[in-house]
Amino acid sequence: MSHIPLRLTTGAFILNAGYGKRHLDKDSAAGLQSMAAKVIPPVTRMKPETFGKVLSYAEMTLGAALLAPFLPSRLVGVGLGIFSGSLLTMYRRIPGMTQADGIRPSQQGTALAKDVWMFGIAVALVLDRKPKSGNTR
């Protein structure tokens, strides 16, 4: 039960983000592809339009998985961890996203740095253990 708020809010947010990317124009898709290439260089082999579609469907799939109550929290937590970890890696690798200390976000980097909350939720979903039968918390 404690996972419902985490999964519902995060799943709806990611599903909506993916849904909004369904019809990206070529320039917008190319911009996102360029950022993603900082983490996953092989994405540069794709056409920007194809990358945009794949990104959209991947986000919608992850969002739907988080919303599906029959999928184990650990499993969707791993998926969310990979997704949010990739976003945080982009944040660290793209010039101008951080202040001079390399950690605190610049004005430009705040949009990616805020995704740290998703990584925290992923860790909570993966690490949370169900009590063994007979045990109470």
Image (spheres, rainbow, N blue to C red):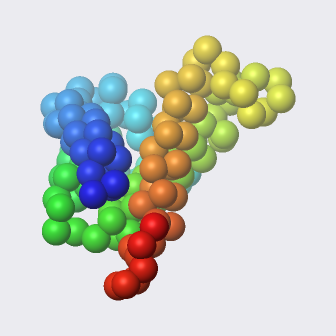
Marks counted in the figure total 0
The C terminus appears in which quarter of the rendering? bottom left
Q: For this view, does 103 lie left or right of residue 92?
A: right
Coordinates of residue 101 in the picture (x, y in percent) = 83, 29
Q: Residue at x 18, y 61 (%)?
A: 69
Residue 125 in the image: above or below residue 21: below
> Residue at the top extreme?
107
Residue 73 in the image: above or below residue 35: below
Q: Residue at x 34, y 47 (%)?
A: 6
Residue 56 visible in this rendered orientation of the protein: no
Q: Quadrant of residue 109?
A: top right
Coordinates of residue 121 in the picture (x, y in percent) = 45, 50
Q: Quadrant of residue 16?
A: top left
Q: Quadrant of residue 9?
A: top left
Coordinates of residue 61 in the picture (x, y in percent) = 21, 55
Q: Residue at x 50, y 25 (%)?
A: 111
Residue 107 visible in this rendered orientation of the protein: yes
Q: 92 or 84: which is nearer to us?
A: 84
Coordinates of residue 50 in the picture (x, y in percent) = 24, 47
Q: 118 or 59: which is nearer to us?
A: 118
Q: Residue at x 27, y 30 (%)?
A: 26
